[in-house]
Amino acid sequence: MCGSRPSRPGPLADRRQGAASNGEHDVCVVGGGPAGASLALRLAELGRRVVVVEKAAFPRSHVGESLAFGVMPLLEVLGLRSAVESAGFLRSSWATVDWASERNRYEVHGGPSLLVDRARFDAILLQAASSLAGVRLYQPARVVRATRVGARWEVALDTGEVVHAKYLAQASGRSRIRVSSQTGALPGTKRAIGPRTLALYAYWRDTADFSVGEQGDTLVEAGREAWYWGAPLPDRTFNATVFVDPGPGGDYEKLLEQSKLLGPRLRNARRLSEIHITDATPFADLVPATSSSIKVGDAGLSIDPLSSQGVQTAIGTALHAALVLNTLMDRPEDTELALDFYRARVRESADFHAAAAADFYLRQAVCDGGDFWRRRVPASKPKASRELPAPSARIARSPHLRFEPVAVAEASHISRRDGLKASGKSYAFVGEEIALAPLLFELDGPMSAFDLVRRWSRRLAPQKALQVLHWAWSEGLIDPERPGP
Ligand SMILES: Cc1cc2nc3c(=O)[nH]c(=O)nc-3n(C[C@H](O)[C@H](O)[C@H](O)COP(=O)(O)OP(=O)(O)OC[C@H]3O[C@@H](n4cnc5c(N)ncnc54)[C@H](O)[C@@H]3O)c2cc1C
């Protein structure tokens, strides 16, 4: 809801020739997954010279096949929506969820999710990026070390080659790269933002078809010692994943047998793949950007897989990172502004996803007091949502609110715009387009909620005005009128 509006840039002067005539690149992107490919694509569109290093030959398999509908506007920004939509992936409009002692079948929020083959999905993105004139791709090639030498990075590849770039973008997913630097990227600044969790998964064929309606559903279930996720994939295989505590004792097939949703479906199915084991603990990096480096995608923020929004979040961070790097290069005087913007976005996204997952875990833990669920209950109490003000209730601006210029994402740079700060957060827009400062400025003294909506209705449709009031209230920008002295 705050100042971030990714959009395609207008035509920009081609800066390629002057940018790096000595063969040095502006940015070296380590990793060509969704985050790295999106970052490279956008930077090249902004006229930057980019080198991408990807260790795996594509297509390569990857877990994370269910893409929430929210990925679509981001693919649109990348100019890849129709390429992805016509790639023959599945659409899933329904999820069957067995959680907190209830089984429900939901229509998924916003629009159908895409069930993709990540090998093909990731290849579409990387192919689109590497076909641009400003992008050079080393693949397969693994970054073995990145060293900050003077004002540039020397990036050593396992092929023996060395790549030079002014900025380093770490898009290597959950794997770390070795970095030698005093001021650049800082390894080891990650903190867990959710329960330590391992994922055990495998691909299956010949699963039992349930009732016709449920065939394409994503399945989510809370068990005693695990939680489960399953979905059909475009090649008619089925991904069955079990999320467990780290450590010994997670017998994948035994746990699957205990699943009410997955067990019956897999009883006569054939397991096609080995059982993969991967860390699924959500992490956020405390220093996702410095003046010479940036971490995008899972390298900066790995969210809880419960949300199925990892890919969407990875692409979102890449779109912002492209603007941040472009600002660092074009407007060095705005370096702190751009870095603050990026750090705040990563922190807010981490907080949002951590709170959403915690809420979901808490609902289950209330029904099942076992150790597995108790370990998933957040240490701090979730913030209670405030009851909305009645139309006649007298309201006022929060005393914590200050009108100040704030950082916002524009077409090609991070810029300063009139906005608000409150409780350590910055706000410029609500939704995509509505500038917030002029609206809050109109709340120039205590008034009824009804009167405020009426004032705002001169600028906004009344329904929109009401939505903005509810949002500003839940963010704590608007409070009940304080009694006088
Ligand atoms: C069990 C599980 C289930 C998930 N389910 C979903 C889901 O349903 N939906 C969803 O949206 N998200 C899901 N996610 C999250 C999602 O997979 C990630 O958020 C997403 O892949 C992140 O993209 P990325 O580009 O940051 O990293 P990645 O996709 O991991 O790409 C990183 C790339 O970097 C390359 N690389 C690594 N090290 C080097 C190196 N040294 N040199 C060169 N290249 C290197 C790798 O080969 C890889 O191609 C899930 C995650 C887990 C663990």
Image: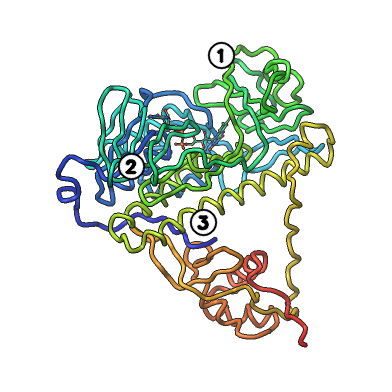
Q: Position of residue 310 (x, y in %)?
A: 53, 39
Mark 1 or mark 2: name the one nearer the start of the chain: 2
- Residue 442 vertical position relative to residue 380 in the rendered view, above or below: below
Task: Quote the CA–CA distance across marks 3 and 1.
Answer: 40 Å
Which residue is denoted by mark 1 in the rendering? 274
Task: Choose between 153 and 458: the one closer to the eye.
Answer: 153
- Residue at 59% over, 22% down: 277
Residue most extreme to the front: 182
Q: Is mark 2 within 8 Å of ligand 1?
A: no
- Residue at 73% over, 38% down: 376
- Residue at 43% over, 34% down: 172
Picture quadrant of residue 246: top right
- Dots 1, 2 in contact, CB < 8 A: no
Sort mark 2 into few (<14), some (14-19) or many (20+) by Cα contacts within 10 Å.
Answer: many
Q: Where is residue 325 in the image (x, y as percent from the top left)?
A: 35, 51
Question: Which amino acid, by three-letter code, is at mark 3?
Answer: Ala
Label of residue 344 in the image: 3
Q: Nearer the viewer, mark 3 or mark 2?
A: 3
Judge from the rendering whether residue 235 lies leftward or rightward of residue 83; answer left or right. right
Label of residue 40 in the image: 2
* Tag count: 3
Task: Quote the CA–CA distance across marks 3 and 2.
Answer: 22 Å
Question: Which amino acid, by three-letter code, is at mark 1?
Answer: Glu
